[in-house]
Image (cartoon, rainbow, N blue to C red):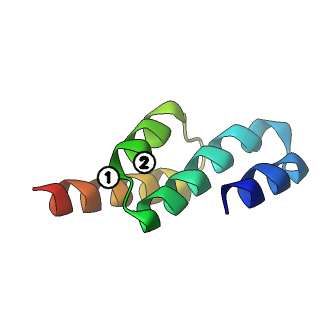
Amino acid sequence: MAFFVEGYSQFLPEDLKEDYQHYNTARLAFAKGHYDQVMDLLIQADYDDLLLHIGANVMLLKIFFLEG
């Protein structure tokens, strides 16, 4: 499924492309339980979009809760 995110991110505006690609790849990794990869991806992005920023923080909080 990561190929889907990479393939379709080319249709996004250049200023949003990288952040959305990192965020959605992180969501896929979270669903698969790859929490270390999720944290690496979320830290790389600089979120200008408020909803992406909130979503990234929620994912990080879920990881911290699940990992103890």
Q: Residue shown at 54%/54% (left/top)?
A: 52
Query: How far, Cα to Cα, is label 2 from label 1?
Result: 8 Å
Q: Nearest the camera: 2 or 50?
A: 2
Q: Quadrant of the N terminus?
A: bottom right
Instruction: State the residue lying farthest toward the right.
Output: 11
Q: Which residue is mark 2?
A: 38
Q: Residue shown at 59%/53% (left/top)?
A: 25
Rate crowding at label 1 as few (under 14), some (14 to 19) or many (20 or more) other CA atoms within 10 Å. Answer: some
Left or right of 66, for residue 13: right
Q: Nearest the camera: 22 or 48?
A: 22
Give the secondary structure at mark 2: helix
Instruction: State the residue lying farthest toward the bottom.
Output: 31
Q: Is residue 32 above or below residue 67?
A: below
User: Is tag 2's residue or tag 1's residue first in the polypeptide sequence?
Assistant: 2
Q: Residue 19: image x %, image y %?
A: 63, 42
Task: State if disc 1 and disc 2 touch (CB < 8 Å).
Answer: yes
Q: Residue shown at 16%/61% (left/top)?
A: 65
Q: Residue shown at 59%/41% (left/top)?
A: 48
> How many numbered circles are shown?
2
Left or right of 13, for residue 5: left
Q: Which residue is mark 1?
A: 60
Q: Nearest the camera: 43 or 50?
A: 43
Give the secondary structure at mark 1: helix
Left or right of 63, for residue 2: right
Instruction: Name which residue type carries label 1.
Output: Leu
Image quarter of residue 61: bottom left
Which of labels 2 and 1 is toward the front? 2
Q: Quadrant of the C terminus?
A: bottom left
